[in-house]
Structure formats: structure tokens, C-alpha cells
Image: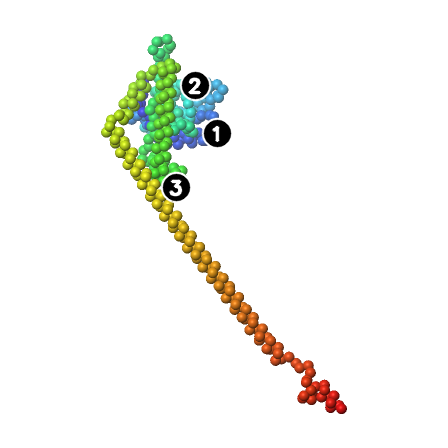
């Protein structure tokens, strides 16, 4: 049996293939999808560079009943070797989100195509913060007292996501439309730090729960886990040293000084904008009042000119009427009036 790899490296192409497989087959359902992983072992690390989907069905009521298309795997594997002979079958994947009863049987079936096949659970919709992948390999376990025969159990393997330069360029192009361009680099950095701290908090809670179960006697003591925890504790700095405490204090004061100066500058800029806004508002009000005054003056001037024009036209009309009106009767002096006629008759 070949040695178990020290770490498993999952490439972005595999994650994209798994997500596409899930969206096409089992989206908005409780089903899981299954596929085959392709890659190679290099310097103790297992590089998973490619994958392909496999038809899979299982009974939801009875997990021991399942179907995996063997002939499809053989045909796809034969075609994959023609494209890239370096890639070999290294294991299989499913979308979990946890290990199920039939996983050991499927792993035993996959051992027909590779020795010591790896199981990678890829969570398409992860609920916890962290990597969406978890890798396991099957191992024979024998109880210390020898009361039971050996049985297969899954053992966790360290997993990470790594990309080559062409894959990084492709991922950047895919995420170009997803990124929010309005969020600055500082906000993005703070968001990443917040996400990392939340993930660290979740991992510490898991460690606490595990240690509590060991103390209560519900889980046996795993010395490998204890050694790893001791290494983690040894890496923690000794905060009781005066020099380290002073360094932390100086660093904190410098950071707080920057925050304080930033707040002052922000306040000064806000007051400056407020004053500019008030001045612009006053200028607009004065311009509005000047326009209103000019409009009133123009209206009064037009009213006066109209009134003067009306008076002149009235005088002219009166003069014209007086000069052109006919005389209805004389006054008798020129002998043309009625009296003159009467006198002439006498």
C-alpha cells in the first residue's frame, strides 16, 4: 500500500466542476453528487487537478442501497488518459455535507481503480467559515484491548486550496463580475480579517468541545491530537515578558494615534464641507432674491409704460372726436339757424 500523502491540494478547477455538477443535478434537493478525482502525488503532496462527474443514485430511506456506474468510470478514465497521461485516479468526491454510511463501501469499490483512494467532501453551500473541502482516507483500526477485529475508519488529512498561474488568471476573470468595486481595499482587508477571526473562533470552539468530551470520558485520548495542541500552545507568545508587553503597548498606541488623527481629519473635512455648503446656499438665496427684485422692477416699469400709453391714446381720441363732430344747429348770428329762417319769412 502506498504511503498516505501528508497534505491534499485541491485546485480551483475541481471546485468549479463540483459546483457545476451539483447545480445541474441536485440543486434545491437533499441529494448529493458523486465524482472521480484525478491528480498525482508530488513530494508527499497529493495534487488534485481534475475531476469528472459519475452517475450515482442512493435510497434516502436505506443508505446501504446505492448505485454507481462502473462502466461510465472506465470509459471516462480511458478518455482522460488520452488527454493527460500524468493524471491518475486518486479518489472520489461527494457534496456531503458529512460522511455517510455507504462511504466506506464506495471507497472500497474505488480501490479497484487506485490504491488507498481518497475521499474529499466538497460543501457546495458551506455553513461554517473556512475551506469548503475535507479530505479523508480509510485506515484499519484495531482496538487496544484486541476484543474486536480490525475495521475501516476514516482519518482526516490536511487540505488546502492552491492554484497555478493560469488558474489564478481564470479565477480572476470569473470573479471580476462578482467583486463589488465600490468597496475599497481597506474595507476588503478588514472584512477578510473579520472572516479569519470568526473562523479561528469556530476552530477554538471545536477544540474546546473535543477536550471536554475527552475529560468526560465520552471520547478516548488521541495522543496525536494532544501533541498538535501542545505545539500550538508552544507557539503562543509569552505575554508576561516586560519587553513584549511594552512592544504591544507601543504598537497599540501607534495604531490608536493613526485612528485618532484620521477621526480629526474626517471631522475637519466634514466641517469644511458644511461651511462650503452654507456659503453656496447663501449665494443661491441672494441670487434668487436679486432675480425676484429685478423681476418686480421690470413688472412695475412695464405697468407704468402701459398706463402712460393708455393716457396718451385717450387724449388723442378725445381730440379727434372733438374736431370731426357735425354741428346740429346754428346760433342765429350768421342767418343760417332756425331763427334766421323765421325772421326771413316775416
Label 2 secondary element: loop
Residue behind mark 1: 28
Side of 129 relative to 45 (left or right): right
Q: Earlier in the sequence, mark 3 or mark 2?
A: 2
Determine contact: label 3, label 1, CB under 8 Å.
no
What residue is shown at x 29% (from left), y 19% (from top)?
Answer: 227
Assess disc 1: are there few (<14), some (14-19) or many (≥20) residues with their C-alpha within 10 Å of its C-alpha.
few
Tell me which colouring the rendered structure shows. rainbow
Residue behind mark 3: 182
The answer to whether any part of residue 268 appears in the image is yes
Q: Earlier in the sequence, mark 1 or mark 2?
A: 1
What residue is shown at x 33% (from left), y 32% (from top)?
Answer: 163
Quadrant in which residue 337 is drawn:
bottom right
The answer to whether any part of residue 131 appears in the image is no
Q: What is the CA distance from the residue labelled 3 to the residue labelled 1?
A: 31 Å
What residue is shown at x 55% (from left), y 69% (from top)?
Answer: 307
Quadrant in which residue 335 is drawn:
bottom right
Q: What is the CA distance from the residue labelled 1 to the residue labelled 2?
A: 23 Å
How many marks the image carries: the answer is: 3
Numbered tag placed on residue 101 in the rendering: 2
Amino acid at each position: 500500500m502506498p504511503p498516505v500523502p501528508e497534505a491534499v491540494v485541491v485546485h480551483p478547477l475541481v471546485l468549479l466542476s463540483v459546483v457545476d455538477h451539483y447545480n445541474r443535478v441536485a440543486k434545491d434537493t437533499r441529494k448529493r453528487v458523486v465524482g472521480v478525482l484525478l491528480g498525482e502525488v508530488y513530494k508527499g503532496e497529493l495534487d488534485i487537478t481534475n475531476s469528472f462527474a459519475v452517475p450515482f443514485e442512493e435510497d434516502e430511506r436505506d443508505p446501504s442501497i446505492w448505485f454507481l456506474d462502473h462502466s461510465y468510470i472506465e470509459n471516462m478514465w480511458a478518455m482522460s488518459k488520452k488527454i493527460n497521461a500524468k493524471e491518475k485516479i486518486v479518489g472520489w468526491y461527494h457534496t456531503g455535507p458529512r460522511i455517510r454510511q455507504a462511504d466506506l463501501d464506495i471507497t472500497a469499490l474505488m480501490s479497484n481503480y487506485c490504491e488507498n483512494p481518497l475521499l474529499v467532501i466538497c460543501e457546495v453551500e458551506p455553513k461554517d467559515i473556512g475551506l469548503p473541502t475535507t479530505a479523508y482516507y480509510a485506515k484499519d483500526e484495531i482496538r487496544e484491548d484486541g476484543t474486536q477485529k480490525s475495521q475501516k475508519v476514516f482519518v482526516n488529512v490536511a487540505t488546502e486550496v492552491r492554484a497555478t498561474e493560469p488558474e489564478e488568471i481564470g479565477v480572476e476573470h470569473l470573479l471580476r463580475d462578482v467583486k463589488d468595486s465600490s468597496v475599497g481595499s481597506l474595507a476588503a482587508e478588514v472584512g477578510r480579517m473579520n472572516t479569519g477571526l470568526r473562523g479561528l473562533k469556530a476552530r477554538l470552539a471545536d477544540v474546546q468541545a473535543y477536550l471536554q468530551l475527552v475529560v468526560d470520558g465520552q471520547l478516548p485520548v488521541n495522543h496525536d491530537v494532544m501533541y498538535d495542541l501542545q505545539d500550538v500552545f508552544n507557539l503562543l507568545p509569552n505575554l508576561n515578558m516586560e519587553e513584549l508587553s511594552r512592544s504591544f503597548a507601543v504598537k497599540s498606541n501607534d495604531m490608536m494615534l493613526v485612528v485618532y488623527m484620521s477621526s480629526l481629519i474626517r471631522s475637519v473635512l466634514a466641517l469644511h464641507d458644511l461651511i462650503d455648503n452654507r456659503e453656496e446656499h447663501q449665494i443661491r438665496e441672494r441670487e434668487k432674491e436679486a432675480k425676484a427684485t429685478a423681476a418686480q422692477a421690470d413688472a412695475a416699469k412695464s405697468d407704468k409704460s402701459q398706463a402712460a400709453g393708455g393716457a396718451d391714446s385717450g387724449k388723442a381720441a378725445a381730440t379727434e372726436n372733438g374736431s370731426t363732430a357735425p354741428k346740429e344747429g346754428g346760433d342765429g348770428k350768421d342767418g343760417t339757424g332756425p331763427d334766421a329762417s323765421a325772421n326771413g319769412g316775416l
